[in-house]
Image: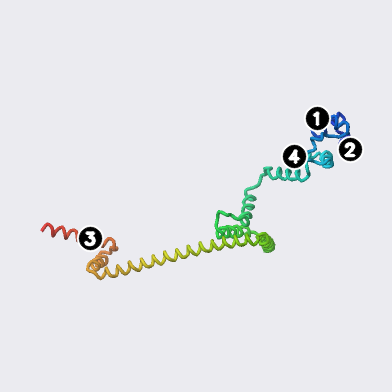
Amino acid sequence: MSLLDAILGNANFMNNQCLICQNPLGDIEITLNHKWHYDCEKCQICGNDLAGEVIAECLTSEREISHKPCWDKKHEALMAARPVEVTQGLLDYLNNVRLMIDGDLSKTIDDNQSIAEQAQRRWMHDKSIDEIFMSLRKMQAITACCSIVLNERQKKEVSLRISTEEKRRREAELKSQVLSAEDFRESEQKKLERKREKQTPEGKAIAQLMKTFGWNEEVAREHLKSMKANSQGTESVQ
């Protein structure tokens, strides 16, 4: 439909009504044979001025009176907000793919890498060699793009975060080694103390009780303590 057909076929035009708001035209518009109010020459989406050619295009295509980019953006937003029904299987698949790419800043670098590896293994489970190879090349392209986007400052920040993660990991490993060394020293010290204790009369008595009755050290020690208490009680009575 041409603009002329759209205008001539519009009853509002024949009745001196604005083709945009359908209200009566003013004297100025009628005198100048203008088809709409000058005040209506605005994008109904962004509110900025609109050229007459764009308004004519909107009337011809029966599109909302607006800039084409504004309409496209609004249409995309409407489409994006439109609810759709998906199966749980498709949702799980899409979420698994997302986990391979999206970074979670609340987790450490190691945790993010571990999540990506697990998601990738699940994804590769039913893929052919050709599909896996093609995905590898696509991910190489993604990695290259990420490297380009990261400028020198961002690279420095990323390197700093990685260094911090490495430092934290080394500190944790060192702390673990120190605790292990302390546990080892305590264990060796206890062994040495027990060895010395076994050389005392009390230690020999405990060892004899353990061997005779099959008791563990704690039971034998308590029994020896009880025997000493009874012995001291008998001496006090005498």
Q: Which residue is mark 3?
A: 225
Residue 220 placed where, x, y %? 26, 62
CA distance for labels 4 and 2: 26 Å
Q: Which residue is mark 2?
A: 4
In this view of the protein, can residue 131 be seen by the observer?
Answer: no
Residue contact at pointers 2 and 3, CB within 8 angstroms: no
Residue 217 placed where, x, y %? 29, 63
Q: Which residue is mark 4?
A: 47
**Callout 2 amino acid:** Leu
**Callout 4 amino acid:** Gly
Along the line of sight, the residue nearer the viewer: 203 or 80: 80
CA distance for labels 4 and 1: 19 Å
Q: Earlier in the sequence, mark 4 or mark 2?
A: 2
Task: Return the residue found at the far front.
Answer: 28
> Which quarter of the picture shows residue 113?
bottom right
Residue contact at pointers 3 and 4, CB within 8 angstroms: no
CA distance for labels 3 and 1: 109 Å
The correct choice, above or below, for 34 with respect to 113 in the image is above
Q: Which dot, 4 or 2, sits closer to the camera?
A: 4
In the image, taking residue 88 as reference, residue 169 lies left or right, namely left
The correct choice, above or below, for 27 with respect to 196 in the image is above
In the image, taking residue 8 as reference, residue 41 lies left or right, namely left
Q: Which residue is mark 1?
A: 23
Q: Which image quarter holds the N terminus?
A: top right
Q: Which dot, 3 or 4, sits closer to the camera?
A: 4
Q: Which dot, 2 or 3, sits closer to the camera?
A: 2
Q: Earlier in the sequence, mark 3 or mark 4?
A: 4
Residue 231 placed where, x, y %? 16, 60
Q: How is the image coloured?
A: rainbow
**Callout 3 amino acid:** Lys
Residue contact at pointers 4 and 1, CB within 8 angstroms: no
In the image, taking residue 199 as reference, residue 234 lies left or right, namely left
